[in-house]
Image (cartoon, helix red, strand yellow):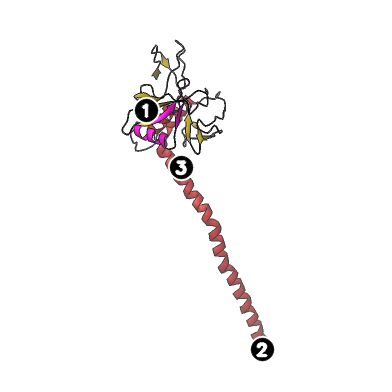
Amino acid sequence: MALCMQCSAPLPANTQVCRYCGVRNDMDLLGRQAVRVADAGVKRQCPNCAIGLQTVALSREGTLHIERCSECFGLFFDPGELEVLLEDSVAPVADFNLPLLQNINRERYQADRPVKYLKCPVCQVLMNRMLYGYQSGVVVNRCKGHGVWLDNGQISHLLEWKKAGGQLLDRKKTTERQAKARAETAKPAFRSDSAVPANRAGSEAEVLEAIAAVVFKLFE
C-alpha cells in the first residue's frame, strides 16, 4: 500500500488526498520514477484543472518526456509514450494470472466515479473514452491525433495489470477476435463459390432429362 509523502499514513487504492494530513499525493510517479521538471510551460492545458501542464523528464535510457498537471497529477502521453513507459517499468511475464487480474480490478473499481468527457490538452477537442486493454479496468481518454490522458492513479493500476500478465491476455484476446473476424469474412465467399457447382449440376441434369425424353419418343 502506498504511503502519504507528507505524513507516511497509508493511502488506499485510488486515494490521492491523505485523510490524516489532507495532502494530495502523486500516486503514479512518486517513488516509482525519478522525476525532473523539464519545462513549466503553459502550451498544453490540464483537462481537469484548466492550468498549464508541466513537462517532466523521467530518468531512463533515452529520457522520456511526458506532461503532468501539478494540481491533480494527471498525465498526458504523446502517441506511443504510454506503451514505452509500461515496457520499461515492468519486467516481461511468462503468463497471465486471471484471478489476480480480477482481484486488482475489484480493489480499484470505483462505482461512484462519474463519466466525464475531457478535452484534449493540445487541440481542445473532446477525447474518446476507451478501455485500455482487456481486463485492465482502466478507461483512458484518447485523442486520435495527439495522445492519451490518464487520471492520477491509473498508471499504477496499469502497472499492476501488466505485472499480472494483463498485456499477454489482451494480446491473446485480440488475436482471437482477429481470427474470428477473418473466419466470418470468409464464410460468404465460401457459400457463393459452393453455390456455383450446385447450379451447374442442376442445369446439366435438366439437359440430360430432355435428351432422355427425346430418345424415349424415338423408340415409342
Identify residue for label 1.
57
Callout 2 crowding tier (Cα within 10 Å): few <14, some 14–19, many ≥20: few
Q: Is residue 116 left or right of 84 when viewed as pictured?
A: right
Query: x%, y% of residue 18?
Result: 45, 14
* Amino acid type at mark 1: Ala
- Say whether disc 2 or disc 1 marks the residue closer to the N-terminus: 1
Establish if 215 lies above or below 59. Answer: below
Question: Residue 188 in the image: x percent, y percent?
Answer: 56, 57
Secondary structure beneath label 3: helix
Of badges 3 and 1, nearer the viewer stands 1
Q: Position of residue 132 (x, y in %)?
A: 47, 35
Membership of 85 in magenta stretch: yes
Depth check, front residue: 176 or 88: 88
Amino acid type, residue under disc 3 in the picture: Lys
User: Could you give the CA–CA distance between mark 3 and mark 1, rounded to whole angstroms?
Assistant: 34 Å
Pick the residue in front: 102 or 21. Answer: 21
Which image quarter: residue 154? Answer: top left
The residue stretch that appears in magenta: 65-92
Quadrant of residue 54 within the rendered picture: top left
Q: Residue at x 66, y 82 (%)?
A: 213
Q: Badge 3 is on which residue?
A: 173
Q: Which residue is found at the position 63% from the left and 82% from the top? A: 211
Q: Residue at x 58, y 71 (%)?
A: 200
